[in-house]
Structures are given as C-alpha cells and as structure tokens.
Amino acid sequence: MSNIFKDKQFVLLISFAFLIRLSIIFLFLGHSDPDNSAGFIENLNNQQDPLGMPYSIFSHIFPYYFPEFFKIINIDYLKGLRIMSMLSEILLIFSISRLKIFNIKYLIYFVALNPFLILYSGFHGQTDLWAISFAILAISELNKKKIISPAFLFAFACLIKPMVVVSIFFFLTKNLRNNLKFLSVFILTCILPYILTFNFYIILKNLLLIFNYMFLTSKITTHVLWIFAEFTNKYSLILIILSIIFLKRYSDKTINHFVLILPIVILLKGGLASQYFSWLIPLLIFNLKVGIISSFIFSINYIFSYYNSFFANGEFSNINSFALNNRFFGDNVVLIPFDISTFNNIYLVLSNISMFLILANVIYFIYQKK
Amino acid sequence: MIRYFLIFYLAVNAILFTKFNQFTYIEKFEDIKMLDRLPSKIYKTHLIQSIKEIKIKAPSEKSWNNNLISELAQSRYLNYGTNLKFDLIANEEYCIDTPKVIKIFNKNEEYFQLSSKYKKLYASNRGMPKNNCFKIINDSKLTVNFDVLSDKNYLSINNENIKISYNDVIKINPLLLLLFFLFIMLIINIYFLLSKRNNELYIL
C-alpha cells in the first residue's frame, strides 16, 4: 500500500483530486440540503425539537453534528459537511479494498477522478456514502465467516441511512443460530441510541418519520423523472422483495446482492433525488470502464438536477449553489441559460437516458459475472 | 478494526446522550385524534379514555430565537453572489420581503436575518418574523443578498416592489463552466483509467 505513494505521478493526481474538491467547497455556495441539516443542528444546540430529518437519531450526531467541530478551525458547518463527505469517499476506498477484488490503485483512481463524486462532495455534502461504505465493510467481515462484526457494522450503516436496511436479507443464511446472533447484535446496536434519548416522544416521532419516508414517499416529491415510474412506483415494495428473492437465487455472494439491490431500488422507486446516484458507485466500480463512462452521463444529469427546483417550484435553493465566493471573484450572479420548456425537454431526456444506463449497468454486471 | 469502530460508536452515543439530556421537556397530553372517530360505545370505554389521558414528555416548541447568526455562518450567505445596499431611515417600520437574506446595520448594532421564506427552508428559528416587519431606531444600511439572475428574484420594501438592477456584476454561466470541468475530467480519466488495456490495473 505504502509503495504506491512513492509514485510521484500518483501523489500528484491524489493532490489534484483533493484540491479540486476543496476548491469547489470554498469557491461555490453549494447545495441547499446541508442548509436543512444546519437548521436541525442549530435546534439541537438550542435544546429545541431537532426532529424532522427522516434519518435515525444516531445520524443526527454522526455524521450531521460532526461538522460543528470544524468551527474550531474557522470552517462553517456547511463547508464542514462537505469536507466530511470527502472523508466518506476515503472510507469507501478502504471498505471496497477489504473485499480483495480490486487493485487499490484502481480504486483510488476511480474515486479520486470520478466526476460525480467530485460534484457530490464539492457541492452537496451528503451522507449516503457513509452508509454504503459501512455496509460494504460489514460484507467484507461476513466474507471472513464472522457474525458479530458484520451485524454491528451493518447496523451502523442503517443508523446513518435507514434505506440500506433492505439489504439485511442478504446477511441471513439457512443457519438459524447464526441468524439469531446476527439479528440480536443488529437490533441491540440499532436501539441503543434510541434508549439513550430516554424519551418516548422522540423515539416514536423519529421512527414514524423514517417509516413515512421509506414507504410512503412517492415519485411526486422527487427529482429524477423516469417513464416506467407510473407503474413501478405503486408496486415498488413488492417488486423490491421479489428482486431480493431473485438476487439470493442468482448469486451466493453477498457483495453481488448489495451492489445490485441499490440500483434496483432506484429503478423501482422510479424517481429519486439526484444524490442517490451515489448508490450506484459500487456498481460503477465493479463495471470498470463501462462504469467510468456512465459516471459522466450521471454527472451531467446531476448538474441539470440543480435547475429542477427552480423550474418546477420557482425556488432558488439549489440553483444558487453555483454562486461564486465574492471575496475572490467580486459580486456575481448566476445566469439561467435556458427557458422552462427547453429545460424540461433536456431534463426528461437526460433522466431517462440515466435510468436506462442504470439498467444497462445492472445487465452488464450480471453478464460480466457469468 | 472493529474495536476502533466500537469505540467510535460509543463516543457518538455519548455525545447523543449529552445533547438530548440538555433538552427542556414539557409534559403534555398527546391528542390522538384518530380515537375521536371511534363509535361512541367504544369511545366511552375505560380503556380508550385511559389512552386519552396518557401524558408524554415532548421537547419544548421551537421559539423565536433572538440570537443572531454567527459571523462564521453569515459568511455562508453574504460572501456568495451579490449584495445590494439601501438606506433605511430611523424610527420607521419596515417590511422587507425577499427570497434569501438581509443584513441591517448601523454604528451601534447589526442584525443579520434569513428571510422568512429562506428560514422555512433552513428549518431555522433565526430569521425574520412571518410578516417580515421590524422597526429600527437609528439610521441604518440594509444589505440584501441575491444569487440568481432571474425574473422571479424579488425585493419588496413596505409592499413596494423594488426593481433590481445589477451594475458591475459578473454574470456567470455555471453550466458552461461545469461542462468544461467534465471535459477536462474525461481527458484525465481516459489517460489514467480508460486507455489501460491491461486488466492488472483494475483487478487483483
């Protein structure tokens, strides 16, 4: 591992990857999603009801509270959250490298130079990659025939983003004793943060919020448009369960199940917020060159998604992400380069191309494994 | 490895406990309105009536917070985009409606507030009151921040729409900038990843 850092070209490239992410973080205003979490953390600090985020109580502290620590070095919360997102990329490299499938140099190159990940950490500062990385770490431990550590790490992933809980079936085997052990550790890890609140109201409200977000959110509230969504969204829960059964039969490797279920959920839910493209990163890594090329199409779609809330609801919240730091560039305003009908047409085409590309990547992955 | 993650998990839980322990909880009756729809015979039973009397401890409601947004957080709003400045006269009431943020300052004091619309998005309780109105004692300056050049951008002072004009301001087209970025990244990706024919770079 340390040998690769002796390669000057490699070190230069990694420095470039860090620098370009930091430049975006410090030069651009960034996405409004972190604004929302900043508000919840502000309420948490003021001992007022912080509930509202559809993630577990645990995630209110990690990763959402952690950027507060960056204030010590004079970096505000919203930049801190995006720097945290960079750290989740490092954990992703670490967790996939533990599967012992890929060359570490490829993993680092892929993550460092991936345009979607640069935009994701630079502009957005989301937390999906933390959950995905912990789930993959759990799988790497499961491959070593362990039970307790995968259960703990998988619970950690679910505590950050409850959506990954659909993968729990892939951790269960025909061995009932092992399943019981796994579930006991999983449940204990998940409920401890709730117990520590010592408040029934907080527990109940938080669980209801998560339930509402996971099962009742429809495509109307989301960003990416997908023509088959009208059909798949209604039956998404049944279709996801069927997919899980199919995946269990198709392969005996948990990592294959996990890599495939995330894009399948995106396709079946039929229209999810643009940051969910990060769920595809493990699949794109496995698909090598096809994955790298797909990243560019997803990135273009991701950039266009920033204009969506403006054209759909007249909100400036995402489009103002592109405002430049006026200390460096002077006063500036962001231009909107198209009218509503042009945007709608481009976005519809791009979103559907992206969705077909997800499908193509899933098929390519299955074909490759055969 | 698992040991370090366990310590980390416990540390996060310790912070969680400390944070939620500081809350002010208020005992209140949880009004389960669904129960009212039950047939009167069932509704009047002892069991349902006892459910209605359950008291829970809820965190105190979000209240108006007079703490101004910190200097560090202010930079997030005023250091991006463009700021337009206006003069405000003393002892007058002002109602200002705008999508993002305003800053009011004079020699003695300085207010920095999110607009009520932005406050809602930000889920913050620091910001302009719902009616966007306030009174100032001294002559002051008003700074209004905008990020996006659009017909939908607006500023209304005392119900009078102010025409916004941007002079000597850089107008940026981020789309071109980002597409150029993608092009550069594609070339770098072709050189370092896509052009490699030997699979050894990829798989162990």
Image: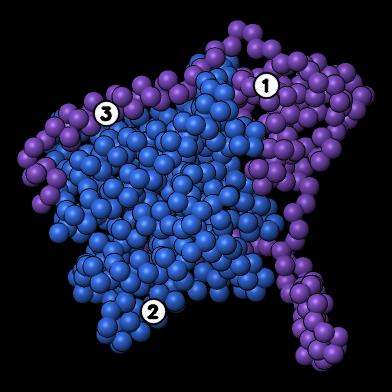
Both labels 2 and 1 in a single chain: no
Name the tint of chain A in the rendering: blue
Name the tint of chain B in the rendering: purple
Asked if residue A75 shows in the view, the reply is no
- Name the residue nearer the viewer: A346 or B139: A346
Q: As displayed, is residue A126 above or below residue B189?
A: below
Task: State the image coordinates of residue A191 (x, y, percent, origin top left).
Answer: 50, 74
Between marks 2 and 1, how big is the CA–CA gap? Answer: 56 Å
Query: Which residue is at 25% across, 39% downward?
Result: A292
Mark 1, chain letter?
B
Please give the residue where the numbered disc 2 appears in the rendered image: A183
Please give the residue where the numbered disc 3 appears in the rendered image: B186
Mark 2, chain letter?
A
Please give the residue where the numbered disc 1 appears in the rendered image: B151
Task: State the image coordinates of residue B17 (x, y, percent, origin top left).
Answer: 56, 66
Both labels 3 and 1 in a single chain: yes
Image-based side of A269 in relation to A290, left or right: right
Q: Are marks 2 and 1 in contact (CB under 8 Å)?
A: no
Both labels 3 and 2 in a single chain: no
Q: Given the image, on which type of amino acid does mark 3 rest?
A: Leu
Tag 2, which secondary structure?
A: helix
Question: Callout 3 environment at 10 Å: few (<14), some (14 to 19), or many (20+)?
Answer: many
**Pair 3/1: label in front:** 1
Task: State the image coordinates of residue A173 (x, y, percent, origin top left).
Answer: 28, 79
Between marks 3 and 1, how big is the CA–CA gap? Answer: 35 Å
Q: As displayed, is residue A34 above or below residue A217?
A: above
Determine the residue located farthest toward the bottom in the rendered image.
B46
Tag 1, which secondary structure?
A: loop
